[in-house]
Amino acid sequence: MLIDTYGRVATDLRVSLTDRCNLRCTYCMPEEGLQWLAKPDLLTDDEIVRLIRIAVTELGIDEVRFTGGEPLLRPGLTGIVERVAALTPRPQMSLTTNGIGLERTAAALREAGLDRVNVSLDTLRPDVFQTMTRRKRHGDVLRGLAAAHAAGLTPVKVNTVLMRGLNDDEAPDLLAWAVENSYELRFIEQMPLDAQHGWKRDGMITAGDILASLRTRFTLTPEGEEKRGAAPAERWIVDGGPHRVGVIASVTRPFCRACDRTRLTADGQVRTCLFATEETDLRSALRSDAPDAEIARIWKLAMWGKKAGSGLDDPSFLQPERPMSAIGG
Ligand code: SAM
Ligand code: SF4
């Protein structure tokens, strides 16, 4: 098991498949993009599948989420999903994506064994989308969402970040739209993980702001802690149900005590937390022909050192060197 000194057990593995992206969301990346990882530094498809196999068969991982950067840009994605689906025990598999290209790939991904998707969409307004992502791709995302739903990658979840003065007036409209389309909407508080270090605590929209805005149009009833488990999202029942809305309040209502995640970057580094400032190298072990047991040992040791919390409230908090897009959000 991947256990830490606080008794938490990691069962959920987030795998970043690439640090590249075809959008430039302002809270994530600068307009010019970033210095991408060099191809030889990226894990190969075989290396990724091997690490996931070790995680699933030796370390108790039962859920795998592919992310990035934009994971749909990884040419071998469908093959990776297919090979992970063939593992015993078979983990649950999901994908976090900006939705561009999902229209073309949703059915094949479902066929390969993907269970669910989270699609990021911050606005219903194409002009605001262009301002927030610096690309004219709003229609692609909406079509990707519809294709995911039609392919049975359900429940389709929608991730939304609200930014002051851009889309912070849209929360009730987004929820009405999500209810109508049977998508499950989850708001994510903006975190200090952007490459350009533009996050400011007093500039962010908090969970409190989001709930107040939603309550102008909807009745929200808390779903309760027992249902939440280790899920990062706190959920509310919308207008008596059955629809739910979630808020991931990493900044104002952190959930570190229940965290069950471990992370793998596209260049083969284990991270114990989004906000970790240390990483543990698995790629060198992979490339020096270490046996599975040795790789499992290194991974366990890394998780044993997981810190109690993100440290966001600590005056000495330092933003990790890697931005969100290179960690895997
Ligand atoms: N490109 C994919 C996407 O956008 O869904 C996957 C990677 S992206 C880093 C994963 C999630 O992180 C997205 O929902 C995105 O909105 C969110 N995200 C990125 N930067 C963030 C930040 N600074 N604070 C909060 N969420 C952020
Ligand atoms: Fe790309 Fe996702 Fe970052 Fe937007 S949030 S720039 S889609 S990695």
Image (spheres, rainbow, N blue to C red):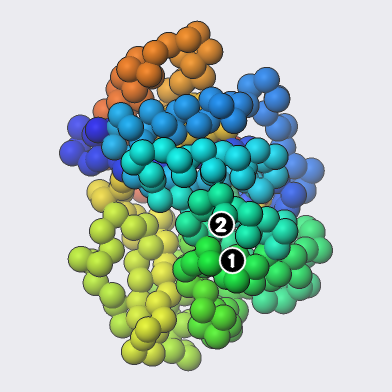
The percent coordinates of residue 20 (x first, y second) are: 69, 40
Q: How many marks?
A: 2
Report the side of 89 relative to 111 (left or right). Answer: left
Q: Is residue 71 above or below residue 201?
A: above
- Under 8 Å from ligand 1: the CB of mark 1? no
The percent coordinates of residue 198 (x first, y second) are: 62, 50
- Residue lying at 18% horizontally and 39% vertically, measured from the top left: 7
- Residue lying at 69% horizontally and 71% vertically, measured from the top left: 142
- Residue lying at 49% horizontally and 67% vertically, measured from the top left: 154
The reply to whether dot 1 and dot 2 touch (C-beta < 8 Å) is yes
The percent coordinates of residue 295 (x first, y second) are: 38, 19
Q: List the residue tagged with mark 2.
A: 110
Q: List the residue tagged with mark 1.
A: 151
Extreme residue toward the top, this view: 288
Name the one closer to the observer, 103 or 219.
103
Q: Amino acid at mark 1?
A: Ala
Task: Specify whether residue 203 is in view.
Answer: no
Name the one closer to the observer, 44 or 39.
44
The span from disc 1 to disc 2 (Cα, nearest Å) is: 7 Å
Q: Quadrant of the N terminus?
A: top left
